[in-house]
Image (spheres, coloured by chain):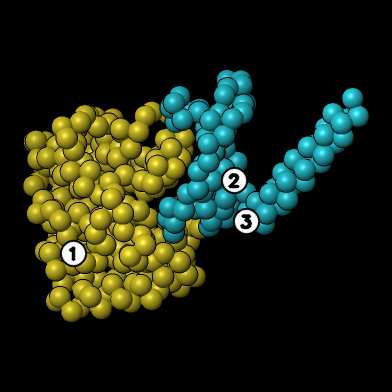
Chain colours: A cyan, B yellow
Amino acid sequence: MCTMIVEQADISGSGKGPKGWFRVDRVNVMFDHPFNLPEDHALSIDFVDASAGPGARVAVELTAESGRELVKALLAAIERGERELGEVAAAS
Amino acid sequence: MHEYTTDQYEGMIAETVTITGDNGDPIHTYLARPLGAGPYPGVVMIHHIPGWDEFNREMARRFAHHGFIAICPNLYERDGHGTPEDVAAAVRAAGGVADSQVIADVEGAKAYLDGLPYFNGKAGLIGTCSGGRHTYLVACSSDQFDAAVDCWGGRVIMGEDEINEKMPVAPIDLTENLSIPLLGIFGNDDVSPTAAQVDEHEEVLKQHGKDYEFHRYEGAGHGFFYHHTAMYRPEATMDAYQHIFEFYGKHLT
């Protein structure tokens, strides 16, 4: 089905597309038909520069379970990075 | 359904043209037609949510091969240009296009057909996925068409939480206005529309005494025409196309 399920967030970062790196300012997270993944439905995650037209997009398509694993990995990396960098800052 | 024999000349032209859509906007449109003086019936194709893509172009050429003028407007024209996937992703993130804009764009495609000297004056509608929903919406909202084919249009029946500014009315609530024959093509394993929703749709059509026929396929889900995906079901697809060509042959010629 066309679920039209979309969650969006403003972000600050860079993404690498076919023409190299560009700034990204929004992430669109959808649960709908994937374009490429051979699943009826999947997570589509698009990192975009909202002001630069449809082509300014770094896209991934993931199964729902992969999305959950991604969330765990993201949070673990952020927590570890903030903790370790915090320890370095406290020691210096 | 036009059947070619091996001794016949056959030719078609398929190209991008520009029509006038909603608000007078110029819209790129794919047009495929048989070569010849005609007159040929027309089919306005309403593309699916993955965009104005290769599948729709292939389908248009299929209709041209079978003796129809197929015309498929780019409903995402206002949302920028790029690969069909990139444009469709942007439109999806923005919540789709407005129903009122789609209706006017599709009527613009019909107006383009009306100006063609090889058009016989009768036009059908067809759409898959979101285009199936749009097909039903246009069929219930416009007096410009002669037959409609809804291929697994989801959200013809909508919950209150699905109604929004772009989609202010559930198409099922417009059924009373349907004045042309309807052909419905559905996979019983689909989740939108579910088999129960297709049952409900059929019941509403019966209540209003509408001219319709539904064909429903076991072992098929959503998008079973899409030969480039795992959803493809060849036997169901070929049977459905046979029904479509017979339906259009009956109502557009």
Residue closer to the observer: B234 or B92: B92
Return the mark for residue A61: 2
Q: Which residue is mark 3?
A: A64
User: What's the CA distance linking mark 1 and mark 2?
Assistant: 36 Å
Residue closer to the observer: B172 or B183: B172
Quarter holding the C terminus of chain B is: bottom left
Residue closer to the observer: B214 or A11: A11
The amino acid sitting under disc 3 is Ala
Q: Residue at x 43, y 37 (%)?
A: B90
Q: Residue at x 62, y 49 (%)?
A: A62
Check contact, mark 3 vs mark 2: CB within 8 A: no
Q: Is residue A11 left or right of residue B169?
A: right
Q: Position of residue B79 (x, y in %)?
A: 35, 33
Q: Is residue B65 left or right of residue A21?
A: left
> For the residue labelled by badge 2, is the local secondary structure a helix, a strand or a loop?
strand
Return the mark for residue B174: 1
The amino acid sitting under disc 1 is Leu
